[in-house]
Image: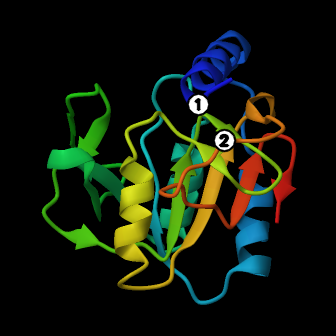
Amino acid sequence: MNKSQIRKKILNIRKNNFNQNLKINTNNFISFLKININNINNLGGYYPSNYEIDDLEILDLLQKKNFKISLPVIKKNNQMDFYKWSNNDPLKINKFGIPEPISSKKFYPDILLVPLVGYDNDYNRLGYGGGFYDRYIEKIEKIKKVVKIGLAFSCQKIKNIPLNQYDKKLDFIVTDKEILK
């Protein structure tokens, strides 16, 4: 199967298995951050859509712990940047129907929470096919080191993700059932 076929299959599985109660344990995630990642308080999250695993509870809790939170804003040519956001800030809807911050304060996250369509045991991710996160990771890693954490439901795991030269590996993958590290 090629990426497009795999993507379609996993998106269907994710939609059929979506359950509001199925989520990442926020306290376990915070403990994982404390143990594995030091002196980092600038986090790029995402606003969940299309049956993605919800990271908003994690973002809210980290903000209360004085983390600076940012969300992506889609730009031209499949580019994106991250901008300051808190759960009290207004959002606008982008061309994909995803809420984005209206802030003009650009951030370069130390930790990047990455939504994904599929993943494997080698920390490879399958996205939606637009290359937004791969391009962003390429860009930010020229500026600073960033810890890339994929978030997914365990049902999105597959044996092997087909790769190309642009695909970026993740550092960790956190699901409703496990943490790959």
Q: Is residue 101 visible?
A: no
Q: Is residue 170 left or right of residue 130?
A: right
Location of residue 141 in the rendering, given as x and y in whole percent from the top left corner: 43, 78
Q: Quadrant of residue 103?
A: bottom left
Residues packed near mark 1 inside 10 Å, few (<14), some (14 to 19) or many (20 plus) = some
Q: Is residue 28 left or right of residue 144?
A: right
Residues packed near mark 2 inside 10 Å, few (<14), some (14 to 19) or many (20 plus) = some
How was this image coloured? rainbow
The residue at 59%/25% (across/down) is 7
SS type, badge 2: loop
Residue position for label 2: 162
The residue at 37%/49% (across/down) is 132
- The type of residue carrying mark 2 is Pro
- The type of residue carrying mark 1 is Lys
Location of residue 43 in the rendering, given as x and y in whole percent from the top left corner: 47, 68
Q: Disc number at residue 32?
A: none
Q: In which quadrant of the rendered image does the C terminus lie?
A: bottom right
Q: Is residue 109 left or right of residue 148?
A: left
SS type, badge 1: helix
Q: Earlier in the sequence, mark 2 or mark 1?
A: 1
Q: Is residue 63 visible?
A: yes
29, above or below 176, in the image? below
Residue position for label 1: 3
Asked whether the beta carbons under mark 2 and mark 1 sit within 8 Å of each other, the answer is yes
> Seen from this angle, which residue lies furthest bottom?
39
Location of residue 15 in the rendering, given as x and y in whole percent from the top left corner: 62, 14
Q: Quadrant of residue 16?
A: top right
Q: In which quadrant of the rendered image does the N terminus lie?
A: top right
Q: Nearer the viewer, residue 174 or 12?
A: 12
The residue at 48%/35% (across/down) is 48
Q: Is residue 68 left or right of residue 122?
A: left
Q: Nearer the viewer, residue 11 or 2?
A: 2
